[in-house]
Amino acid sequence: MTLLNETHDPSLRSWVASANAAGNDFPLQNLPFAVFRRKGSGEAFRGGVAIGDQILDLSAAAASGAFTGVAATAAQAGAQDKLNALMALGEAAWSALRLALSRALREGSAQQAALQGCLVPQAEAEYDVPARIGDYTDFYTSVHHATNIGKQFRPDNPLLPNYKWVPIGYHGRASSIGVSGQAFHRPKGQTMPPGAEMPVVGPCKRLDIELELGIFVGKGNALGHAVPITQAEQHVFGICLLNDWSARDIQGWEYQPLGPFLSKNFATTISPWVVTLEALAPYRVAFTRPEGDPAPLPYLDSPANQAHGAFDIQLQVGLRTPRMAQAGQGDATICRTSYRHAYWTIAQMLAHHTVNGCNLQPGDLLGSGTLSGPTLDQAGALIELTTGGKKPVQLPGGEQRVFLEDGDAVVIRGWCEKPGAARVGFGECWGTVLPAL
Amino acid sequence: MTLLNETHDPSLRSWVASANAAGNDFPLQNLPFAVFRRKGSGEAFRGGVAIGDQILDLSAAAASGAFTGVAATAAQAGAQDKLNALMALGEAAWSALRLALSRALREGSAQQAALQGCLVPQAEAEYDVPARIGDYTDFYTSVHHATNIGKQFRPDNPLLPNYKWVPIGYHGRASSIGVSGQAFHRPKGQTMPPGAEMPVVGPCKRLDIELELGIFVGKGNALGHAVPITQAEQHVFGICLLNDWSARDIQGWEYQPLGPFLSKNFATTISPWVVTLEALAPYRVAFTRPEGDPAPLPYLDSPANQAHGAFDIQLQVGLRTPRMAQAGQGDATICRTSYRHAYWTIAQMLAHHTVNGCNLQPGDLLGSGTLSGPTLDQAGALIELTTGGKKPVQLPGGEQRVFLEDGDAVVIRGWCEKPGAARVGFGECWGTVLPAL
């Protein structure tokens, strides 16, 4: 695998001027995909590529004749109302399209004239969930999260004996996945108050976030046929931001013995932009385990996975209360961490998911699980940040939170940055809590 | 709700002679739906209705002009390659189509001439999964199964404190659901042998069945909007047979804390025929709980649910080893039970699933969970029938089984029967274990 190629050259500049601005999430080296339309237009959703503060409309671009060969086929597939067809094409096609986009959007490109009219300002766009998600699987790849939350649910037994051997995952709900901007009603459900004799039914009192990344499956595998770890990343299209909203009081009462259900399936919010693995290549890092931990079993291990199976993606969670919004304030950061702290890599998740022959399909979504880092301020959920609701998070203006209140908005941001490489950003993933119905 | 109407009259006879034969699963009073095509024909799959040993091709029937009004609209919706559009129409349309089908297929019907050419013999048909299943949820509605299996995984704590309050469910995998006739490779995976220091990876050694029913969601509900139990059954299209194949050794090692994952998602087999709730009306029975058990919480309780929320569906599991097959023998029955023993009704499952606002969509599938009855010979899984693999099941010719061996075929059969009502059958749900790859 050639990790870096001409598309990663940090000196490349685009004829879309905003793409060259420092600190911008979508320079020419990123080129993430979404499905979008002009806000309130009633137009059909179609695929687009972020460039600076613009979106290159793939439907218009494909029709413009700016691309040829495999890249043209891929652009055509990406022009549909969901990205599944593009995802199904596989990495050679994704790579060909990336190269064509990089060249066509560069300063001095001969395609500038043809593509100039294919731009839509992001400020004028609205987005949809980028793929028809056939199945959604949520993993549990942060050992710090597993330990922190394990302490709350099982104080005497926080990290279970299987954790360091099995990339724990479970099936989530696909129908309630929404795109950034999703507003959802506080869920109701059964909870068992401490010391009560019988459960009560009512609005969730411990509504939480989970800072995650979402991994979109590209090419699928046939039922019965495991994907070896050495080929696993060939089946990954890209990565988005994901907030796995969680009702902790419902979860605590319902989760045994079959796992979380209503505590999770009322809403899951993802960012519109899907950043390809190829765009993230400069930010690959070695995958290592703490001294003394067991080596992964052979089906979960490979030289490439060890050498560069992890990604150093900076992550941040912001919270904006109704009072802050009314005062015209932005969100307050409540957590900063990096994806590099995950205990299992994407390749391991995919190899594990298919080891029994389970078939993944283009557009399937894998959640990373809450990405808490090693220290408590790096925790990706309020239940950890507040030590189970005991120590409130302090917000500007004297407000504080243990769990989410009605009207609270939460944003996840993600980006990669380092000297000698272009910034690669994920944009934002916003969600808002509405009162219970 | 009028439970019984003219379509249930047991004296009705069809001009399709085989439908009038005693013991036949598909008399005129049943009229279940499937999607089918002629075996090996390469034709498009389309909806069909079972009548005796024939299938009424809904595509051809709709085109024949045999139906009018709402029934014609419903037949047209049911003529597609999946039943989702029919499922989405709701119970008034399903009921109108049922009445039209009942009248058109009766002896002396004026539509006989038009429909005679729309029949395809079941012996010449092959089937597909009847709906695009957006999400698959598996419940755990047999208290006997929960107790039996709880003893194996948690000897000191078989029935958890939430069981009698919460209709426990979890999300399953939609992509690996196949239709009767499915053959799948024995899954491989991680297991922790008793006393071992580290897990091993290899073919599952404790491959099991789970006798279940599958409930197809008809009309969906919008995200955020719970379905009250009094309206829950309006969202149910019908019921099929379901085998939730399970790798017990993988399950035992992976399932904590987030529930079963690879131990279940390698294959799930359902019957092609979906029997509507309306067809099952004569077999409704009162829903009662054992003396001393808590009453269901108000959102899980209604007079109608108490009066006739349960269904008396006879269920049977058969096993045929390769040696039995070679000797030309049929399957040997290893379990007989009834759905009436379930601890939670369909209406309760649906009301619970949506109480937090989770959106169900047409074609979603809800598994009942293993339907074990009160005695051990009524258990719907080998792990129960063999007391955790300790007491083999005896088969004809001196063979025995603790768990499934390669080449074993398992069949689930289901039917309703009683004096004064026509038999309503589900057909068969077959699956075969292939060797691990």
Image (spheres, coloured by chain):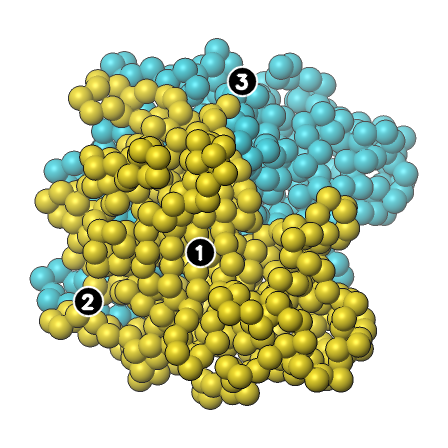
Chain colours: A yellow, B cyan
The residue drawn where x is 32% and y is 56% is A336
- Where's residue A409, x and y in %? 46, 40
The residue drawn where x is 34% and y is 72% is A310
- Circle 2: residue type: Pro
Which residue is label 2 attached to? B199
As measured in the structure, the alpha-carbon distance from the residue carrying label 1 to the one carrying label 2 is: 38 Å
Quarter location, residue A308: bottom left
Which residue is label 3 attached to? B230
The numbered disc on residue A413 is 1
Quarter location, residue A80: bottom right
Q: Which numbered disc, 3 or 1, marks the residue closer to the eye? A: 1
The numbered disc on residue A367 is none
- Circle 3: residue type: Thr
As measured in the structure, the alpha-carbon distance from the residue carrying label 3 to the one carrying label 1 is: 43 Å
Say whether disc 3 or disc 2 marks the residue closer to the N-terminus.
Answer: 2
- Tell which subunit mark 1 falls on: A
Viewer-proximal residue, B321 or B70?
B70
Q: Is residue B93 left or right of residue B305?
A: right
The residue drawn where x is 43% and y is 52% is A412
Where disc 1 sits, the SS reads strand
Q: Residue furthest top?
A: B303
For residue B388, above or below residue A307: above
Q: Are marks 1 and 2 on the same chain?
A: no
| Residue A110 appears in the picture as rendered | yes
As measured in the structure, the alpha-carbon distance from the residue carrying label 3 to the one carrying label 2 is: 48 Å
